[in-house]
Amino acid sequence: MIKIKNRKILLLPGDGIGPEVVAEVKKVIQWLNSKKSLDFTIDEDLIGGASIEKHKNPITDEVFYKAMESEIIIFGACGGPKWDNLEFSKKPERALLKLRKELKLFANLRPAICFKQLVEASSLKPEIVSGLDIMIVRELTGGIYFGEPRGIKPIENGERKGINTHTYTSNEIIRVAKVAFELAKKRSKKVTSCEKSNVMESGVLWKEEVQKVRDNDYTDIALNHMLADNCAMQLLRDPKQFDVIVTDNLFGDMLSDEAAMLTGSLGLLPSASLGAKDKNGKMRSMYEPVHGSAPDIAGEGIANPIASILSFSMALRYSLDLDQEADNLDQAVQKVLDDGLRTKDILSKGKKEVSTLQMGDAIISKLK
Ligand code: IPM
Ligand code: MG
């Protein structure tokens, strides 16, 4: 193994089950450090509701600057009912959105892979999902999540009006399309681009710009365009028709939750949020499980740490070029599933239920 010297990694466990699942990632990193295959300096801090409790702010300047300095961030989850009634700008989720936006993490990679051991855990028929391996590339710093104007304002008759704006510029579309085409090169050379060009001008622009990128630079890649609602339907009807899906921030949010359930559980899906490479080839990155803070099961020790551990595996692959180490970690997860160990969310008859902690330990034992 190649020893990576002196890299900094920032853990932001956040709220709900975030701290429980990120603790398992920390164990994996510490184990790799102790085996001298990695040499990471780990730092850890508060974010989201946890930060609100202590600092009355979902992300302090100190944590924000730490994040700016970090090459790799591992994020747990943020939010929960306790903070639901806060003013919008003070909610835990603002911390996550601020990191995505300010660190310019515009490309969000959300792979949906149906593990053969878990075909039964999906609510769809085995023949529909077995062997499923999709990569959703979600644009993460634009669209309706960030568009201006936004807000709630009073209008006549004592009514109020809620406003959000969906905008995309050519460049925002082009850079994320390129990420999708680059990924497709290493996969089955097929990209589906999703928008609502039948009702939205920004969707027309999306479609045209993605097509231009393909025609200019990626003529060996097959591109098809699909309306996002149709894509939602096709994901349930015949998900294996897809390989790489590229779409905007809002559609990507929804389609990736849907794709997650094809694989059996939200507890399995990792994600990588990537920025552009700088002139030294370095890039900012944040890795987080697709699942949220799951307040209903927080603190019980039953959350599935696989999504977080696989998110760290994506960090090894995309930020550190340690494909071998990433493969080892992915295989360790597979082996544990082969052994029949399951957290509650993926438990089925005849399998052994384990806690968050036991799942983490079992995965590490397979690395040995
Ligand atoms: C996600 C989440 C976030 C989003 C929330 C927590 C702000 O649902 O990462 O998919 O909407 O992007
Ligand atoms: Mg979501």
Image (spheres, grey):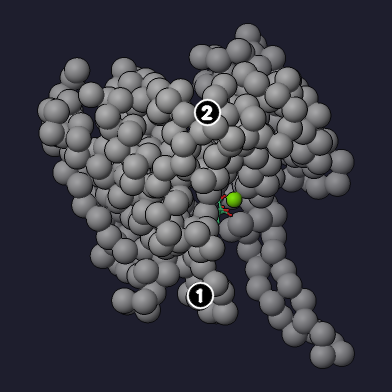
- The residue depicted at 34 percent of the width and 42 percent of the height is 358
| Left or right of residue 258: residue 106 | left
For the N terminus, the quadrant is: top left
- The residue depicted at 59 percent of the width and 58 percent of the height is 146
Q: Is mark 1 on a helix, strand or loop?
A: helix
Q: Where is residue 275 in the image (x, y as percent from the top left)?
A: 42, 39
Q: Position of residue 263 (x, y in %)?
A: 61, 33
Image: 68 above or below 134: below
Which residue type carries mark 2?
Val
Residue 352 visible to an observer of this rendering? yes
- The residue depicted at 37 percent of the width and 31 percent of the height is 313
Which residue type carries mark 1?
Trp
- The residue depicted at 51 percent of the width and 75 percent of the height is 83
- Dot 1 or dot 2, earlier in sequence: 1
Q: Which mark is residue 83?
A: 1
| Left or right of residue 115: residue 237 | right
Is the CB of mark 1 within 8 Å of ligand 1?
A: no
Q: Where is residue 41 in the image (x, y as percent from the top left)?
A: 16, 43
Circle 1 or circle 2, nearest the eye:
1
| Left or right of residue 367: residue 227 | right
Image: 44 above or below 186: below
Q: In which quarter of the image is residue 280?
A: top left
Say which of 325 and 10 sits in front. 325
Residue 282 visible to an observer of this rendering? no
Going by the picture, which residue comes out furthest to the bottom?
158
Q: Residue 253 carries which label?
A: none
Q: Is mark 2 on a helix, strand or loop?
A: helix
Judging by the rendered image, the residue that carries numbered circle 2 is: 179
